Amino acid sequence: SVTEAEELCRVAATTGLPTAVNFTYHSLPGHRFVARLLSEGTIGRLRHLDLSYWQARQGMPGAPVGDAILDVGAHLLDLATWWADSAGAGPITSIAGHDDGGTEKGVRIWSALARTTGDALLAIGADRLAAGWRNGMVGRLVGDAGCLTLTFDTDVTEVRLARFGDGAAEGVAQVLEIPVELAVGYRDFPGFHVDRLVAALRGQIDFPDFFYGLRIQRLIGASNDAVRSRSWVDVDIGRS
C-alpha cells in the first residue's frame, strides 16, 4: 500500500542505506535503449506514449487468481514513469482507469489514461487474456521529431525509429541495432539483472530505489481510485 511504501522510505531515509526495487525492465536491453534514445532527444519533445502489456496466462487452464494492475500494471506504470522522466516530460500528475470488472480469477484487463507535467498524454493497458503472447509488450513513443516503437516478448526485442524527413516526408521506420554495451542474451539475463541489483545496493549504479518505488505505488493507488470512481484522479508527486 502507499502507507507501507511511505514507511519504507522513512526507514530508508533514517538509515541512509542504499535501496532497490526489483523493476526488472530497467535491466532489459531494449527498454534501456529506449530510455537512452529519449534522454538524447532522438524524437524531440515527448507528446504521446502508448504502452500495452500482453499475456495469455489467465486464459490458460488452471490459471491462478491474479490482478492485472498489481501483477503487470506496476511494470507499465514504472516504464511510463521512467521513459517520461528520460524524455524530460515530467511525472504523471493525473490518471483515469477502467478494468473488466474482475472475475473469480481477478482483474484480467485494465487500461488507463494519464497526463504528465510536461503535457505528454499516456495510454496504458494490460491484457492477460491475449492468446499468442507469453510476456510481451508494445510501446510507441511519439515526439515532435519522430516515433520510437518497442516490440518485446520474452526473448524477442525490436526497436524501430522513424523521424520526419528520413526516407519520406512522414519518415520511414527503421530497425535499430541494440548497442553492444546494452546487449544481454535471454539465458544470461537473470544473473545479469541480479548483478545490477547488487550493484545498486552497493551504491555503484543508478537503479529504482524505495523513493522511486513510492512514486509507482502512488500511481497504483490513484489508478485503483480512478477505476472505482470512474473519474480522473490527481497523483501525489511529492518525494516522500
Image (cartoon, rainbow, N blue to C red):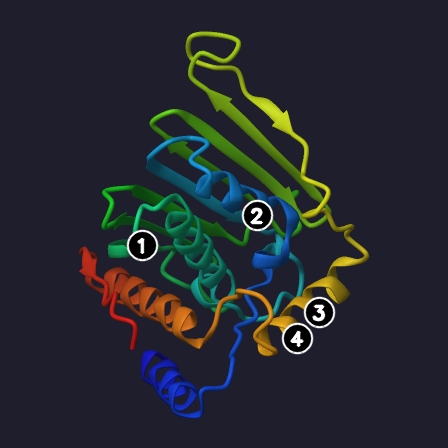
| Residue labelled with disc 3 | 195
Residue 218 as seen in the image, left or right of residue 68:
left
Q: Residue at x 23, y 50 (%)?
A: 117
**Foreground: 112 or 213?**
213
The CA span between labels 2 and 3 is 18 Å
Discs 2, 3 touching: Cβ within 8 Å: no
Q: Position of residue 102 (x, y in %)?
A: 41, 63
Sequence-wise, the earlier of marks 4 and 2 is 2
The image position of residue 110, as x and y in percent, is: 40, 54
Query: Dot 4 lies on which element?
Result: helix
Visible residue check, residue 129: yes
Please tell me in which quadrant of the rendered image residue 62 appears: bottom right
CA distance for labels 4 and 1: 37 Å
Q: CA distance from mark 3 to mark 4?
A: 5 Å
**Rendering coords of residue 80 (x, y %):** 41, 51
Do residues under tags 3 and 4 come within 8 Å of each other at their CB atoms? yes
- Residue for badge 4: 198
In this rendered view, identify the residue nearer to me: 28 or 224.
28
Q: Residues within 10 Å of mark 2 (few under 14, many from 20)?
A: many
Residue beneath label 2, please? 31
Q: Nearer the viewer, mark 4 or mark 1?
A: 4
Q: Determine crowd level at label 4: few under 14, some 14-19, many 20+ residues with C-alpha closer than 10 A.
A: some
Query: In the rendered structure, which disc, 4 or 1, sits on the residue that comes first in sequence?
Result: 1
Q: Say which label, 1 or 2, has the lower sequence index.
A: 2
Tell me the SS state at disc 2: helix
- Badge nearest the viewer, 3 or 1: 3
What is the C-alpha distance between the residues marked 3 and 1? 37 Å
